[in-house]
Image (spheres, helix red, strand yellow):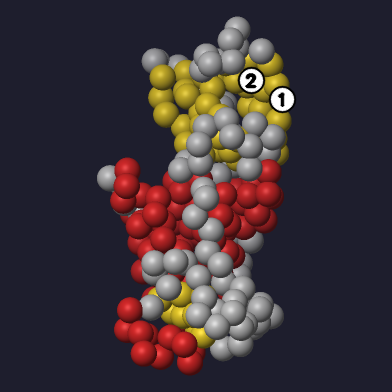
Amino acid sequence: MEWSDEAIILSVRAHGETAAVVDLFTRSHGRHAGLVHGGRSRKARPTLQMGNHVDATWKARLSEHLGHMTVELRRGYAASAMEDAAALSGLTSLCALARLLPERDPHPALYEVTLFVLSFLDDPTVWPALMVRWELALLQELGFGLDLSACAATGGNDQLIYVSPKSGRAVSASAGEPYKDRLLALPQFLTSARDRHATREDVEAGFALTGYFLEQRVLAPKGDTLPESRSRIMTHIERT
């Protein structure tokens, strides 16, 4: 068995004295792990960093085996993110959440969105809002997508400012008024008014929205919680 693909490094862990097990998010083969010989060497370490964009080749005798992997760097997002604490938190959170994807299940659309977000980590005015959109896309790929296109009660698409925590559907201002204390806020940059600039308050509301559904629908049933790096993103946003 053998394949070659481009990928994003999600995690690296030591294996033995010199090797490393690398978990990748590949374009065509989904989340896939492999053993990299010499992965802990001084030469390999700059390449085997979380968030880096790489070319990978995987080989194994049988498909269910861990297999051996060779990796070559395309673009080193990790090095630039390490210069900015907020960007590093964003990169770490993205990689941690991407590991929620099932192994070896392709998600090419989400892969493209992931590369897009990584390419903007050097722009703090853009990437936090992109991260919110990425988390919405992740929920969709995991089978828990939100319906923000029309009001759950009226079917209209005007003044959508809430989201039902039960159904994950948008709710209009008028329909949600009697229940507003029990509804989640829907920032306007996630609605049809996509050209609206996302303010700090919008981004905070967006992270609260996606965080709620990630916790309730995906993580809590497994006994997991959101990564600590995601909490650090919120701290950085509040300080700016």
Q: Residue furthest front?
A: 154
Q: Which mark is residue 58?
A: 2
Q: Which mark is residue 37?
A: none
Residues 238 and 179: in front is 179
Residues 12 and 94: in front is 94
Residue 215 shows in this picture = yes
Q: Residue furthest top?
A: 61
Q: Examine the image and state in which quarter residue 5 appears.
A: top right
User: Image point 44% across, 66% down: which residue?
Assistant: 167
Q: Which residue is mark 1?
A: 4
Badge 2 crowding class, 10 Å Cα cut-off, few under 14, some 14 to 19, many 20 or more, is: many
Asked which secondary structure carries label 1, the reply is: strand
Residue 76 location (% of width, % of height): 62, 44
Asked which secondary structure carries label 2, the reply is: strand
Quarter holding the C terminus is bottom left
Residues 83 and 199: in front is 199
Compare marks 1 and 2 and give the one earlier in the sequence. 1
